[in-house]
Amino acid sequence: MSQVKQARVNNFNRPLCGLRVVLVCLAASLLTVAQADIATYSVTAEEWSRPRSGRGVSELPGLREFVQNWMQAGEGNRQILIQYPGGESGTLWASELRDWLVALSIPSEHILLEAGSPSGDELLVRIENQ
């Protein structure tokens, strides 16, 4: 193949190469977002203010999936971090959620409480590596 034809072929393939890189980066970022959503759960004050029972807590939107994700990931070197609004009511709220997670078969030694939820009216719960 002549050098001119080879140069045209190379120039033609360059945009496709760039497009491939963009598509791979997009797929990786979507996978990261999907994994973050799976490993993060939030409970609003409104959801938590409803009367609680074992059945009611297990039916909170997203909690069942969160616990299933924990079980599938295995205990290993993972922990659950509960970020809660500061103050006595936030501490009580986070402690009560921790107790319910233990009742749902998550070992208490894998659950950490941390004051400082970014929102004053929700708990943020996420699975993290230790």
Image (tube, rainbow, N blue to C red):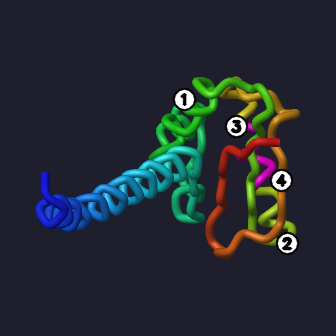
**Kind of residue at badge 2:** Gly
* Between marks 2 and 4 in the image, the one whose residue lies nearer the viewer: 4
Coordinates of residue 69 in the picture (x, y in percent): 56, 33
Mark 4 near mark 3, Cβ–Cβ under 8 Å?
A: no
Q: From the viewer's perspective, is 23 left or right of 38?
A: left
Q: Mark 2 packing: few (<14 Cα in 10 Å), some, or many (20+)?
A: few
Cα separation between marks 4 and 3: 14 Å
Per the model, the C-alpha gap separating discs 1 and 2 is 30 Å
Callout 3 touching callout 2 (CB < 8 Å): no
Residue 41 located left or right of residue 120: left
Circle 3 SS class: helix
Q: Which residue is identified by label 4? A: 113
Q: Secondary structure at mark 4?
A: strand
- The residue under label 3 is which amino acid type? Trp
Label 1 vs 2, first from the N-terminus: 1
Q: CA distance from mark 1 to mark 4?
A: 20 Å
Q: Is residue 122 left or right of residue 116?
A: left
Sort mark 4 into few (<14), some (14-19) or many (20+) by Cα contacts within 10 Å: some
Q: Which region is colored magenta?
A: 94-100
Q: Are marks 1 and 2 in contact (CB under 8 Å)?
A: no
91 shown above or below 127: below
Quickly name the residue at label 3.
Answer: 100
Residue that badge 1 annotates:
68
The residue beneath circle 2 is 87
Residue at screen point 27% across, 62% down: 19
Frontmost of labels 1 and 2 is 1
Of badges 4 and 3, the one in the foreground is: 4
Q: Nearer the viewer, residue 59 or 66?
A: 66
Name the residue type under label 4.
Leu
Task: Decide which of tag 2 and tag 4 comes sooner along the chain.
Answer: 2
Q: Quadrant of residue 50?
A: bottom right
